[in-house]
Every structure is written in C-alpha cells, then in structure tokens.
Image (spheres, rainbow, N blue to C red):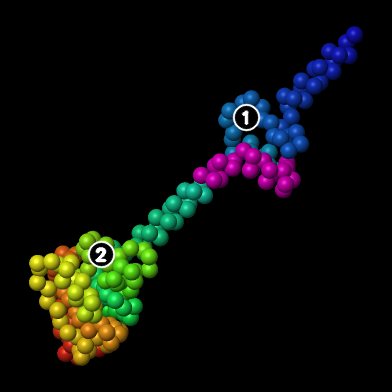
Amino acid sequence: MQRPFLSFRIKEVVLKEGNVMGSTYNDSEQQSVKKTFAGERNKLAQMSAGQKADYIFTYYKFHIICTLLIICIIIWGIHHAMTYVKYEFFGIVINSQELDVSREDDIREYLKMEGHEGVSLESGLYSDESASGGYGNRLSVLMMAGQCDFIFTDEAGIEYLQSFFDDYDIEVRDISDSPIHEYFGLDENTKYLIMAGLSGNVDYLNSFSEMLDEIDSGSIE
C-alpha cells in the first residue's frame, strides 16, 4: 500500500532538483527569478559544447541580438561621424558627361574648406527632359534646391538657363579657348561658363572666381 506513495515522493524530488532534462534546462524557482554569473558559469561547465550552444541560444538570444544591434549602431555612428561630407559648393555640367571630378579636391583646398565641408561636381545633367534617362529632369531639381554655384554648358544649356532665370541677367563666359576648359576635362561642345551662386555661399563664389582667373592666366595648371 505504500509503494505508490514512495514512487510519488521520488518523482517530486527529481523534478525539483533536475537542472538539465534532455535539451531543456530547468532552474529552481529562485534561480529562474535571479540568475547569477557564478551559477550560470558552473552550470555551463557541466555541459557539452552542443549543450552550451543550445542553452545560450535558448536563454540569451535576445540579449545577444540586442548587443549586436547596439554594436552595429555604434560602428555606424563612428563611421558616419568620420566620413560624412556636407557639400557647400556645387558645380554642374549640362548636356555632357565629360568632367574631371578629381578637381573637387583642388577646389576644396583652394577655398580653404574645413572639417567635413566639401565640393560637389556633377555631370550628365540635361536641359532636354527626354535625355534624362527616364528619371525626370534632375537638373531642375538641383537648380530649385540651390545646388548650383557654377555651370559648364553648351548653347542648348544657355537657352534653358535663360528661361530658368527668367528676368535675371546671367553672365555667360566663353571658355572654349581657355585653359579652364582643359583643366576641368570638358568636351568640345561645352564652351560656356556661368557663375550662378545659387547656394548663397558668396565668399566661396568669390574665391572660386579668383581660382578661375589663376587657371586662365596659367598660375594654376
């Protein structure tokens, strides 16, 4: 008559004291509420490599994922802080792909920019929307956004700009026989230079005008 009672007591002890049951890990009531580093280390020391991996993934995957996300955010923040560029001066080429974009660094140095300030040179902008590759007229977007301080263009570009600036007089400079043409690596149809100054950086625009004069005179090659 007592055997069922003894069997029940033995089973109860096993359930209370068992920490590992197959691949399932059961803590005591106190351990489940507050895990300690020493307790977890001792528990892992008694497991095989496979059991350790299974246990860590089962109980700490959320912690691992959060830690990895935090590390990625920190790395991205450091990278962004070290490499981002805030463009302050803009040059564009209308109706041509030809442009030596390496001159960005030369202009930046001449303008004595500091920190993360930079110069943006962009070609492949077209006055004819049908030639813009199906992405809309990016030229109009840049002009409206003020991301245009000087422009190299052809005759078709001049016509477009006259309609864009409407009643404003624009000064057009013929650079077809100027060292400026070669310095910026322009093609033979890109003959004109216009100082637009749409970004509002007057000091940079004046300094760039001085740079152009030095290029034109041969002081800068």
Task: Report the predominant secondary structure element of the magenta stretch.
Answer: helix
Indicate which disc residue 140 carries.
2
* Residue at (27, 75) in percent of width and height: 94
Residue 112 appears in the rendering = no
Q: Position of residue 29 (x, y in %)?
A: 64, 25
* Residue at (76, 20) in percent of width and height: 12
Magenta stretch contains residue 198: no
Q: Is residue 69 above or below residue 59?
A: below
Stretch of the chain drawn in magenta: 46-66
Q: Position of residue 178 (x, y in %)?
A: 20, 89
Left or right placement of residue 103 versus residue 64 in this view: left
Count of numbered labels shown in the rendering: 2
Q: Is residue 37 above or below residue 216?
A: above
User: In front: 88, or 79?
Assistant: 88
Secondary structure state at the residue bearing disc 2: helix
Q: Quadrant of residue 93?
A: bottom left
Question: The disc labelled 1 sits on which kind of residue?
Answer: Gln
Q: Position of residue 154 (x, y in %)?
A: 24, 80
Label 2: few (<14), some or many (≥20) within 10 Å?
A: some
Placement of the N terminus among the 4 image quadrants:
top right
Q: Is residue 123 above or below residue 46?
A: below
Of all residues shown, which one is farthest toward the top? 1
Q: Quadrant of residue 167?
A: bottom left
Q: Earlier in the sequence, mark 2 or mark 1?
A: 1
Tell me the residue that label 1 is attached to.
31
Of all residues shown, which one is farthest toward the front? 130
* Residue at (15, 71) in percent of width and height: 162
Magenta stretch contains residue 56: yes
